[in-house]
Amino acid sequence: MLKRPALLLGMLLTTIAVSLFVASGIANSQSKSKTSKKEEAKKSDDEEIKGRLPRYYGQLDLKEEQIADIYKVQAEYNDEIQELEDKLAALREKMNAECEKVLTAAQKKTLADLRDNSDEKEEAKPKSTTKKKSESKKSDSTKKESDKKSDDDN
């Protein structure tokens, strides 16, 4: 019975997040004039903009000018993206607080203990032991190949 309200809450939060995104985009597009966009472009031409290429772009043999243009595009969106991420984080906090209001005192204590234990485990983990996805995929494919061979042998 708890699954249905949780599903509804998830759908509601998704709807709110999308609404916030659309509303902020409309507000930003209406509030910026063409002259301010030109001023921003001029400022960005004067300053050296740094960024990070999107996934796989590094394999495209991009020219320096293309890389600079990509960084400029990213810079145009970074503030808005950060603002939305902050709003989303605040919304998640609010949702979690409301969810916790439903819990009994014993459940709240158990939840706090579980979170503390999880935090301790994360702090204790050495960072170098995490596998990259590519390494994981390689080991999975190697495992599948060896499983195939053993099946063929039988």
Image (cartoon, rainbow, N blue to C red):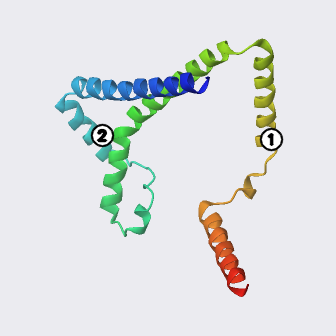
Relative side of 64 to 146, left or right: left
Amino acid marked by disc 1 = Lys
Q: Residue 140 location, x and y as percent?
A: 65, 68
Amino acid marked by disc 2 = Lys
Relative side of 118 to 81, left or right: right
Q: Residue 118 location, x and y as percent?
A: 77, 36
Please name whichever residue, 10 or 121, is drawn nearer the observer in this view of the structure. Answer: 10
Tell me the residue that label 2 is attached to. Answer: 43
Q: Residue 132 location, x and y as percent?
A: 63, 60
- The residue sitting at 73% across, 84% down in the picture is 154
Cα distance between the residues tagged 1 and 2: 46 Å
Report which quarter residue 74 is drawn in.
top left
Vertical order, 110 against 65 (above or below) = above
**Secondary structure category for the residue under label 2:** helix
First in residue order: circle 1 vs circle 2: 2
Tell me the residue that label 1 is attached to. Answer: 121
Residue sitting at the far left: 34
